[in-house]
Image (cartoon, rainbow, N blue to C red):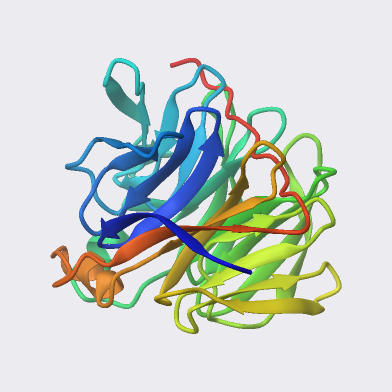
Amino acid sequence: MLFEPVASGFGLAEAPVFDDRGLWFTDMAVGGIRCLRPHGRVDQWLIERKTIGGLVLNEDGAIICSGTGGLVWLDPDTGRSGALLDSIDGAPIGGINDMIADAIGHLFFGTVDHPGMFAGEPIGPSALYRLDPDGRVTLLREGLRFANGFGISADGTRLYHNDSSVGTRAYDLAADGSIGGDSLLREDGDCDGLAVDMEGGVWIARIVSGTIIRVMPDGTVTCEVPVPGGHVTSLCFGGADGCDLYVSTAASGGGEAVMKRTTPATLSGSIYRARADVAGVPRARAAFRL
């Protein structure tokens, strides 16, 4: 793969997702949601909001973002924003990291203890939840280390997510949003963001190794590709044919800066684009009435 830098100057670029308006992504260290437009300009919103580890597009064009305190929505046309989910069963949410929507608008997300993380405590425990379009929240799995990097197979029957420091998990996914058949697709703690292609390949961002790998549903690794600059945080597919692969990276010290709520000494995090031989599974949109 040949990687072309398309945007740079970030502390910890994360959560890329593509639509016809451009490439949406975040900077977990510096803050904010950004959009790399087709003509190259980068627009930004919610610059005061840091630790956004996940973005999902809503069917009305709004952007759902994670972070400390829960889920927030943004209307990028007006700049208006508001809370979507800030508590579960009456208890305030410490933080939400990554997430994904399925074909009928369910939102799957993983929690993270942001207050404890900022206080220097070990990360975890984490849990997997589903948020329905009507606002109902369902606990799907507890006892995770750090729920991260979500993807859904092309036929909608498999849900994947990384459990950072543990490996990549796979579940059977039913049409009603329930899950079963919990298994460890790959035991490798170096796993951050994730994307799935149309052949079933699961692409995993490896922040420590500075590479991306493609893993098939039987656990076979078909390729490992180094990314310029290393510190790979996430990836997504996009472009007219779905074969553009966008990869986000962090500056050296970007992860530590997020934990300490500081800014890295150098803003060398970037977004790269390469071409894949197989198209990615298009990301579904959430179905919330905002």
The part of the image, by quadrant, that contains residue 166 is: bottom right
User: Between residues 268 and 133, which one lies in front from this camera angle?
Assistant: 268
Q: Can residue 141 be seen?
A: no
Q: Is residue 175 left or right of residue 231?
A: right
Q: Locate residue 79, reporting x and y percent.
A: 26, 21
In this view of the protein, which residue sits in the foreground, 197 or 1? 1
Q: Quadrant of the C terminus?
A: top left
Image coords of residue 105 (percent x, y): 64, 29
- Which residue is located at x 48 percent, y 79 percent? 210
The x and y percentages for residue 251 are: 29, 70
> Residue at point 54% right, 68% down?
144
Reply above or below: 216 against 30.
below
85 left or right of 265 in image: right
In the picture, measured across the screen, residue 94 lies left or right of residue 263, that is: right
Of residue 54 and residue 251, the one placed in the foreground of this image is 251
Q: Could you say which quadrant of the image residue 11 lies in?
A: bottom left
Residue appearing at x 74%, y 44% in the figure:
178
